[in-house]
Amino acid sequence: MDAIPVPRKVENRFETRKRNISVLIRIGYDIVLRLFHPSPVIFLLRVHPSRQSTLVAPENFQLEPNLPVQYYLDSFGNQCGRVNASAGTIHFRNHAITSDSGEPDLFAPEAGQERMPSDALTFLLPSRYCEVDSELMTLAWEKFGPIAPGWSRVQAICDFVHEHIRFDYQRARSNRTALEAFRERIGVCRDFTHLAITLCRCLNIPARYVTGYLGDIGVPPMDAPMDFSAWMEVYLGGRWYSFDARHNQPRIGRIVIARGRDAADVPITMVFATHHLEQFNVVTEEIKMNGKSHPAVERAVHSSPGSGMLSLE
């Protein structure tokens, strides 16, 4: 294998602005699928149970047609829904307002690799998109083995992945694995995350995949349509910490939807028939800053179930 240098940490041009007061974040989506055959549809589109207590305005989830939904918790504790849909369109809408501390991701450079609980061991194993049992094992130990175990090693992995993969939304595909992302050097946030997770697992660091909302709070807005985001959580020093190889800087306002071994465990929608995505809009934006409420907050808290997406115009 050719030597691949681990890049030095590149300082971000824009520092995440710290806050000293909580913020409110508007979240939601408007998604339309066209099914060409009748099919069950499983979806993970509700806020994770761990974030339910932070909702200021509850989720206003709507489904068209108005089908009965079977809700259940999967083996990872995610809230899933299942409907039996006919051929035609199925429309998912949701909006909510959630509070957040306004603080960037925790930074704990002293966190080390300590004894891990048995429920973390699942996140060391190979999974569909994370080929721990591949050439990435050799790469991981050659490039990151000499680095002190713990936070520094994980950060070095994120630095490497951040520099190695070029983000290109137009080149996204749903079946790209970590090894393929490493070889192709292109992808979207899920590809950055899969490669970082795989390299961590190769080094005996439990790492799990997270999908959720992440707006441009405390950083300059990105010149791209809003989407759901993916990052990883790594078990260090007796707890899970968020790391993001795509952005590679602490961020404010991560709203978790689901966690799993990789993207296969947490599909936004899973359809068991030929289908086409006709519409996909996601909203994640701050609506309260430094204690000043936007008038839309009151409207959202008292909105009727059929009011649709919350307008901030």
Image: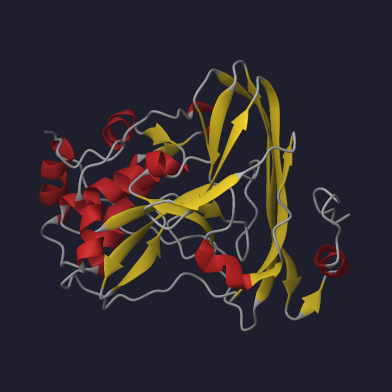
**In the depicted view, which residue is nearer to us: 93 or 23?**
93
Q: Position of residue 241 (x, y in %)?
A: 37, 67
Is residue 236 visible in the rendered image? The answer is: yes
Specify whether 264 is left or right of 21.
left
Residue drawn 38% across the image and 58% down it: 10
Specify whether 233 is left or right of 37.
left
| Position of the C terminus by quadrant | bottom right
Up-down: is 102 above or below 262? Answer: below
Up-down: is 91 above or below 230? Answer: above
Q: Position of residue 27 (x, y in %)?
A: 68, 56
| Position of the N terminus by quadrant | top left
Specify whether 268 is left or right of 217.
left
**How is colour applied across the structure in the image?**
secondary structure
Q: Position of residue 150 (x, y in %)?
A: 21, 68
Residue drawn 73% across the image and 54% down it: 95
Number of marks drawn: 0
Q: Position of residue 283 (x, y in %)?
A: 69, 50
**In the depicted view, which residue is nearer to us: 121 or 250?**
121
**In the depicted view, which residue is nearer to us: 128 or 176?**
128
Q: Residue furthest bottom?
A: 20
**Quadrant housing residue 127:** top left
Up-down: is 88 above or below 56? Answer: above
Residue drawn 60% across the image and 20% down it: 38
Is residue 15 visible in the rendered image? The answer is: no
Residue drawn 61% across the image and 21% down it: 276
